[in-house]
Structures are given as C-alpha cells and as structure tokens.
Amino acid sequence: MRCPYTAYTQLDKRVTQWMARHGLTLLRVSLGAVFLWFGLLKLFTGLSPAGSLAARTVELITFGVAPPGVSIPALALLECVIGVGLITNLFMRTTLLLLFVQMMGTAAAIFLFPGEVFAAPPYAPTPEGEYIIKNVVLAGAALATGSIVRGGRVVPNSGDMSAPTAHKRRSRVDRMLAPFPPD
C-alpha cells in the first residue's frame, strides 16, 4: 500500500504538469471570451454597464473628434477583434498591442471622471468603477499570455517536490537568482 503523502505528491506533480501545459492557453481563451462578450454588449444600447462612461472618455481623449455614435461601435469592434484574436491565437502581437491601447483608454476614465468611478475616492468604487478596475486583472492576464508569444512556456518543476532537507537547501541569494532549482 502506498503512503498517502506519496500518492498526494504524485497527484500534485501530475496536476502541476497539466496546469503548466494548459494553463496559459486556458487563460488566453478565457480572456478572449471576456473581451468578445464585453465587445458584443457594447453593440447593443444600454447593455454595457460602463458604455456611457466609455463614450464620454473616448470623446474627451479624442478632443471631440469621436462622438459617442462613432466611439461606442468602434470600441465594440476593437474589443471583439481583441477577443477573436485571443481565442484563435492569431496575430497575437498585434492583438496584445490593441489590448493594451484599449486598457490605457479604459484606465483614463479613472483620472478623467473620478467622481463617477469612485463613490468615496480612492477606496469605494461605483459599479462602473468596479467594471473598470477589474481591468487590472485582465492586464495581468494579458501580460502572462504575452510571455509565450515568442515561444516561451511554463515549465513545471520536475525535480523532487518534497520539502528541502538541510543538505539540499540553497542559499537565499541562489533562491533569489533562480527561484526554482535546476534539474
């Protein structure tokens, strides 16, 4: 009979390997689905929780060149293109560039309309503010997704995952330079 700790360790290794193999793909596709979904919402008047705030932000940062009748459909199309690019894994560098441009425009609303983004600045966001602030997580997901665009990958630590013993312990400097020990 196998020791429960050994069985747990083996299961943990398999799960970690699966996550390393598929995690960023799932992150990329789910991020794409969110962008596609939110983009589609903007195509229908009144369905996007921050649609009017987005329209006013775009109008302000374009100095009135893009009125709401133009900016909302354009923003919806941009978000849909980003979503499709992420889901299909096509033109990823361009897709991620568009995503970060869109994120900068979204973040601009925090500074341009703080009274509408926060009920009690800077710690109590309004529902529109929550919608905007969640983009911090989306930007982080985009950064993780971008880390594999040029062939990078997540590699599970294939070494022994048991607790380090005194003779295996690495110095603090070594752990800072290379957080995961070499194989």
Image (cartoon, rainbow, N blue to C red):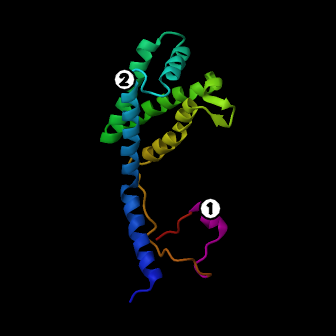
Q: What's the magenta region?
A: 167-178
Instruction: Give the quarter of the figure containing the N terminus.
Output: bottom left
Q: Position of residue 109 (x, y in %)?
A: 58, 25
* Residue depicted at x 52% and y 10%: 64
Are the residues at dot 2 and dot 1 in contact (C-beta closer than 8 Å)?
Answer: no
Q: Nearer the viewer, residue 71 or 85?
A: 71
Rounded to the nearest angstrom, the CA distance separating label 2 from label 1 is 48 Å
Q: Residue furthest bottom?
A: 1
Label ID, residue 120? none
**Residue 89 seen in this snapshot:** no
Image quarter for residue 60? top right
As shown in the figure, which amino acid type bears the numbered disc 2? Leu
* Residue depicted at x 66% and y 30%: 119
The residue labelled by disc 2 is 43
**Residue 37 seen in this snapshot:** yes
Q: Is 177 one of the magenta-colored residues?
A: yes
Q: Is residue 128 above or below residue 60?
A: below
Q: Position of residue 14 (x, y in %)?
A: 38, 69
The residue labelled by disc 1 is 176
Image quarter for residue 2? bottom left
Q: Which numbered disc, 2 or 1, marks the residue that appears first in the sequence?
A: 2
Mark 2: secondary structure:
loop
Q: Is 147 one of the magenta-colored residues?
A: no
